[in-house]
Every structure is written in C-alpha cells, then in structure tokens.
Amino acid sequence: MQSPRYCEIVNRNLLDHPIWEGEALVLINSSINTHSSRWDMGFHKHQAYEISILLEGDAVFQFENTEYFLQEGNVVIIPPNVPHRFYATTPVRWGVIEATFIPKELKKLFYQLTHTEFPRIITLLQIYREQYEVLFRNWLKMKSQPLIEEKKVVCTWVEIFLLFLLQHSKTSHVPITIETTATYIRSNLHQEIRMRDLAILSGFSESNFRRKFKDLYGVTPKQFHQYYRMAEAKWLLVYTKKSLQIISEQIGFSNIHSFSSWFKQIEGLSPSEWRKNKGELVV
C-alpha cells in the first residue's frame, strides 16, 4: 500500500427523498453525520452518485490501494459502483448527498466534476465551505416539510449543489475586488474569517492584501472586522431586546464571557451596563 498523501476533498450530504423520474424511482438521501475518532465505514460500493464534505475533523478516504488524508473543506465526489472506504482519525462531522437514478441532465453535471470510474477530490476554501454548509442546512429544512412539485424541487436542489461545486472547484478563478472582500466581512460578522482565504480570492499574498485593504479603507482587515462587529453589537443592544447570549453569537462569539470581556476592553463598560445607559448610538 502506498504511503498516505494529502488531498483536497468535500463534505457528504444525505437526502431522504424518493421521487419518480418518468418510470424510474429517483432516490435522494441527505444528512449531516457525526462520528467518533474510531469510526470506520469499511470498503463498500453503492449505486448512488455521492458527494461527501468533511465539515469538521480529520479523516482518511481510501480508493484502491491509496489513502488520502482529508481535512475540513475537503470534498469527495464518488461515481456509482466504485469501491471506497472512509475512516476517521479524529471526531468528524460529514455532510453527505447520495442520489440514485438521477436524470440525464444531472448525470452530465455530475461527470463534469469527476470521472465515470474513479472519484475526484477537491477542496473548498473556508468561505465557500461555509456557504455550502448554509446551503445544505437550508436544503435539510426544505425537505423536512411537504413539497409541492416534489420532483422538480429535489432535482433543482441537487442541480444547485452540483453547480456550486463546479463554480468553486476550479483550480483558477477570477480575483475578487478588495471592495468585495469588505462586503463579505460586513456580511459575515457571526463567523470566523481567515484573511488568508480573502487574500487568495483577491489574488494577492496576505501582506499585499492587508496593505491594499488599508490603502483603501484606512484600517487593516482585522480592524475593519472588529469595527463592524462593535457597530453591530451596539445596534443590537440599543434597538433590540435580544439576550446577550444571542447577540454574542450573532457577532461571532461562542459565549457571553468572551463577548463581555471584548466589549468592556474596548468601551470601558460591560454590554449590559452599556445597554442600560443606552450608550452612544453607532450607525
């Protein structure tokens, strides 16, 4: 067996929706699955077209005699009847999609992502991985309710997943503008943002990205992020009755203590004290 090597792969999503395509049953399975570090799926194959994304943790994907180490943001695209194996090396969380007997148009899209006889492994940058996970969770909410035009809805969602991966799995991309990275920061205050990913998307090294960002906005990307975090926190404190826990989560803190310490370090008052005094309005 060859030595394990690092590759780029994506998370798995399972969908439990049987629908009829003509006279053939279209079976879609999707879910988010969590496993311990001892999880080993073993070698297996199936008739489904599979897309698996590793959302958290480290794992290994094995195809034939080669093992590929997987990390967060890795996506594995597997054609039907291809023997393969997954096992975890840390606790893991997967998003998995398996579709059986899909229409010809979706098969064509699927095989733009991979070969008919072996899997393909790609990597999503953190930005796109987070977008993919949001998309996937919205799909899970959608499928949990009765669907009108069920066949059209399910096939449309599968098509969206495939097109998303086609869009973001290319080895080259058109760089985004510095203004677009600023918009992304303002729109994603609730989550961690890695400047390295934004630098890659804008086509610059990290140092050049920081310099160009500061030339345009007068502050570094991190300072820009912190400013809008605070502005959002103050707005929520003044104009809503949301709890400190909810506000802390909305601007990217995992607990109230971290949020309160950060807020007090900057403003000199705790969030609850600032709210009570109404503070200075920040737009």
Image (spheres, helix red, strand yellow):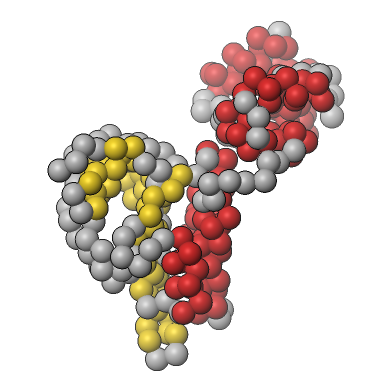
235 or 27: nearer the viewer:
27
Q: Toward the viewer: 257 or 78?
A: 78
Residue with the most extreme left position:
1
Is 8 left, or right, of 236 in this rendering?
left
Which is more toward the observer, 145 or 186? Answer: 186
Q: Nearer the viewer, residue 238 or 113?
A: 113
Residue drawn 18% across the image and 49% down it:
65
Label total for image:
0
x and y percentages locating residue 174 in the rendered image: 67, 46
Q: Position of residue 242 (x, y in %)?
A: 66, 35
x 41%, y 39%: residue: 72
Residue 134 x, y percent position in the rendering = 54, 50
Residue placed at 68% from the left, 22% from the top?
Answer: 208
Quadrant for the C terminus in the image: top right
Does residue 266 appear left or right of residue 144 in this picture?
Answer: right
Q: Is residue 21 above or below residue 89?
A: below
Looking at the rendered image, the quarter that the N terminus falls into is top left
**199 displayed left or right of 1:** right
Residue under the point 75% across and 24% down: 212
